[in-house]
Image (cartoon, helix red, strand yellow):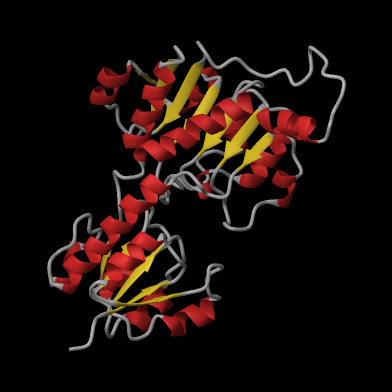
Amino acid sequence: MSKPRIFVPRAVVPEALELLRTRCHVDVGPEAGLPHEELVEAVRGYDGIFTPVIALKADVIDAMAPTCKVIACFGVGFDHVDIAAATRNGIWVTHNPGFVTDDTADMAFALLLAVARRLRECDIFVREGGTPWPLNSFMGLRVSGKTLGLVGSGRIALAVATRAAGFGMTLLYTARHRNEDFEARTGAHYVNKHDLLRQSDFVSLHIPLTSETEKYIGQEEFELMQRHTVLINTARGKVVDEQALVDALRSGLIAAAGLDVFENEPQVHPDLCALPNVLLAPHKGVATMDCFKTLGRSGAEKIFDALDGKLPANCLNPEARHG
């Protein structure tokens, strides 16, 4: 009996591929990913897709539909997959919430500290042999005791709040609804969006990308912030209007930003790259070997369950094969 066939559009950690190969024939696409037209053809005939952040639009899913049983997203995000098209074609879609919390929170706080203390500029200065070292050069922002505004009150926001507690920060948060459990565990105060932006020294975004949150932060929001405010985004790039961010950084509406996600990944607004007061990372919030090994194992196990006809854990559309 032939093995089920699994397609991985772009390489993931070897441990995940090794586990998949214990039960399946696995093909892996190029590291840079495939052009859309080639991807449509490449996915045909597979029993499952194990995908990092690669856009799986309706035409791609329609092409895989005759044989595919499951699309397993490598990480927690799933906005790159057309869930409606998968459901229409009877394909389960899974993701991996819960496993990325600590690593993403670490990245958010690393960006916050690095931007506040202007570490990118300091590093470049030292590497280039800059001298002398004036006492008042690269003056940064104190983090300890300042106000951190968290947009969202989910697992990652909670983990960031826990880290901020060690710095004695005052915590504000805003969300669609007040979260009393979050307040009890963090001591954070619930405020509306505008008050959070007005009062926070640092604003960290932890919301999913939806029709309601697209361009959640734009020109109007930047005008509410203090001129020393630092914006941190480890959520999704499209929740920030990048052109408005560029304008705010240039004009001094806010002091700086730390970004791990972008509006049109992997393309980055060219003006962001030219600004010294923004720190850029290539979507590496969960990029630790600990996290990737866990995500790989979890994703492979979800694929095995789907191939066995079992509803996989963290299925986003359980009705797909039962409608």
Residue drawn at the location 22% of the way across and 54% of the way down:
314
Residue furthest to the bottom in view is 1
Residue drawn at the location 26% of the way across and 56% of the way down:
298
Residue 120 percent across, percent down from the top left:
69, 33
How many numbered badges does the structure rendering display?
Answer: 0
Q: Nearer the viewer, residue 227 or 40?
A: 40
Residue 35 makes an appearance in the image? yes
Residue drawn at the location 72% of the way across and 32% of the way down:
123
Position of the C terminus, as image quadrant, is bottom left
Residue 18 percent across, percent down from the top left:
32, 67
User: Which quadrant of the view contains residue 98?
Assistant: top left
Question: Is 189 placed left or right of 313 in the picture?
Answer: right
Residue drawn at the location 17% of the way across and 66% of the way down:
305
Q: Is residue 134 above or below residue 95?
A: above
Residue 83 makes an appearance in the image? no
Q: Nearer the viewer, residue 15 or 239?
A: 15
User: Which quadrant of the view contains residue 274?
Assistant: top right
Q: Is residue 217 above or below residue 52?
A: above
Residue 276 percent across, percent down from the top left:
74, 35
Position of the N terminus, as image quadrant, is bottom left
